[in-house]
Image (tube, rainbow, N blue to C red):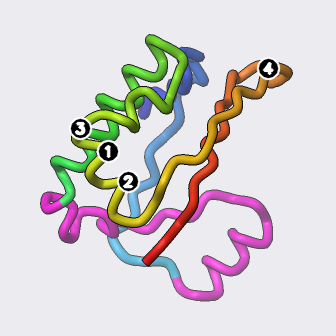
């Protein structure tokens, strides 16, 4: 059984499907149209290790945002700043006061 938890809420436990091969295109299409989960086994295991540092940095960013509840101050510091400056410039940020999830929109200009 797989324990599901999201944003601090316990969503329960579900059986993990055991499927050794990829589903057919028809099964994927049916699942998509039926708004059902699509299991693509081992899809992320291929080459995932090369992204380990980025995943770690994303996790740290998420933990900090959950703790402080502001996003932009972290984007303006290393290592995020260097990555953002390659293609984006932060223009503004707007917290969505009416949203119970506390989503903060970050507006950026993109460039090549």
Tell me how far mark 1 sits from mark 2, CA to CA. Answer: 5 Å
Q: Earlier in the sequence, mark 4 or mark 2?
A: 2
Give whichever of discs 4 and 1 has the lower sequence position: 1
- 46 lies left or right of 25: left
Residue 89 x %, y %:
48, 54
Q: Residue furthest right?
A: 98
Whichever of labels 2 and 3 marks the residue nearer the N terminus, that label is 3
Residue 84's disc is 2
Q: Is residue 39 magenta?
A: yes
- Secondary structure, mark 1, is helix
Contact? badges 1 and 2 (CB < 8 Å): yes
**Residue at 66% over, 39% down:** 105
Q: Is residue 57 left or right of residue 25?
A: left
Question: Where, quadrant-wise, is the N terminus in this rendering?
Answer: top left
Q: Residue at x 36, y 76 (%)?
A: 21
**Which numbered circle lies on residue 78?**
3
């Amino acid at each position: 059984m797989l324990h599901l938890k999201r944003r601090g809420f316990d969503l329960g436990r579900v059986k993990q499907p055991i499927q050794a091969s990829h589903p057919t295109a028809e099964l994927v299409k049916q699942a998509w149209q039926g708004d059902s989960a699509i299991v693509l086994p081992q899809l992320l295991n291929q080459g995932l290790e090369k992204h380990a540092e980025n995943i770690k940095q994303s996790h740290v960013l998420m933990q900090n945002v959950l703790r402080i509840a502001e996003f932009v101050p972290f984007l303006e510091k290393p290592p995020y700043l260097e990555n953002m400056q390659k293609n984006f410039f932060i223009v503004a940020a707007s917290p969505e006061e009416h949203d119970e999830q506390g989503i903060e929109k970050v507006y950026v200009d993109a460039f090549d």
